[in-house]
Image (spheres, rainbow, N blue to C red):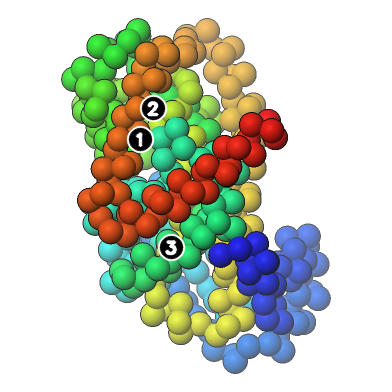
Amino acid sequence: MDRSTFFKGVAAGVIGLPVALRVLMGDEAQAQDELLSSGDGRRFEWKMVTTWPPTLPILADGCKMLADLVRKMSNGRLDITVYGGGELVPALESFDTVRQGGAQMGSGVAYYWSGKVPAAQYFGGLPLGFSAQQMNSWLLAGGGLELWRELYAQYNLRPFLGGNTGMQMGGWFNKEINGLSDFRGLKMRMPGIGGRVLQRLGGSPVLKPAGELYTSLERGLIDALEWIGPYHDYEMGFHEIAKYYYYPGWHEPGSCFEFTVNLDAWNELPEDLQTMLETATHLVNLYTLSEFEARNAETLAKIKSLGTVELKAYPQEVLDAASQAAREVAEELAESDAFARRVYDSILAFGRNAAEWEKLSL
């Protein structure tokens, strides 16, 4: 959808962004007065199942932030209880749980569902593709979100933006990567299209949720891993079990998270609660990227000061090969699925204009 439609949508109804901002700023009394006289009086108790460990900073925090915002804005009429991965259902079963109605809401990233919904991978981001700013622009102002919702409606789901990592790091290794030959036979945690690119480079991609990464690398079940960036990677202790920390994160330059809502549950909500929920997702989307940018900058200095981790740039040979393989994999996916073709064409069209503007604006 275009920018004007987006801003009209966010501001729709009696309750909207101004109320959300008053709640955030602490002026709850005025917000509650408005809310007490709004809506049809029904109350809804929802469950949110996530792919994140229950105490994972930023990502689990964002889910709890959304639940708290909606609870305050609605005066308790929409009460969402958040469950971390494994607390109610296994982390990677959240997609099916929400679409089947076992929970009303979920949080994850679209490329986790590549085996079920091939075209979903594009909405998580592409290797050497959009930055966080460009990803948000394509989704919110370039038609991407409309396509995403059309796709997920086939699975009884409604997606919302759930944050963005910004540029990630390239991964943790216990051996140096001096060229393409060092990827041969390498078992590395890397999901989505990035994992398929890794396979083209000679590696073996492995999909594992966040809660299993440390032990998998420590025990040698995988040879290397990528997660997000300095802040999360440090908090998860990867510096304790790996020596080399590579950059840039070519595989995920601006990865988008998602909130999913069961479509039946969404349609049951009164319009004012729908507006509150969607408004809260936009605030969490902004919060998540902002937190990652700030915390990553702080933590990178801490990692450098350890003296036990070597930060290394990927060889140009690897980056060139990854770029070529990324284009091939993205095009092959588009050729294999009609809806994926539509999504990829939209990305290419938006990307051509974005690239021209980027030359002048950076």
Name which residue type carries label 2: Ser
Q: Are marks 3 and 2 in contact (CB under 8 Å)?
A: no
Q: Residues within 10 Å of mark 3 (few under 14, many from 20)?
A: some
Q: Position of residue 259 (x, y in %)?
A: 46, 60
Q: Position of residue 322 (x, y in %)?
A: 35, 25
Q: Residues within 10 Å of mark 2 (few under 14, many from 20)?
A: some
* Horizontal arrangement in the rendering, residue 144 relative to residue 101 (left or right): right
Assign a secondary structure to mark 3. Answer: helix
Whether residue 158 is visible, yes or no, is yes
Q: Position of residue 197 (x, y in %)?
A: 30, 31
Q: Are marks 2 and 1 in contact (CB under 8 Å)?
A: yes
Residue ID for mark 2: 323
Assign a secondary structure to mark 1. Answer: helix
Q: Nearer the viewer, residue 15 or 31?
A: 15
Residue ID for mark 3: 147
Q: Is residue 112 above or below residue 101?
A: above
Query: Disc 3 to disc 2, how far (Cα)?
Result: 25 Å
Q: Nearer the viewer, residue 288 or 234?
A: 288
Name which residue type carries label 1: Arg
Query: Disc 2 to disc 1, how far (Cα)?
Result: 6 Å
User: Residue drawn 64% across and 57% down?
Assistant: 283
User: Residue drawn 41% across and 51% down?
Assistant: 345
User: Residue drawn 64% across and 42% down?
Assistant: 290
Query: Disc 1 to disc 3, how far (Cα)?
Result: 21 Å
Q: Which mark is residue 327?
A: 1
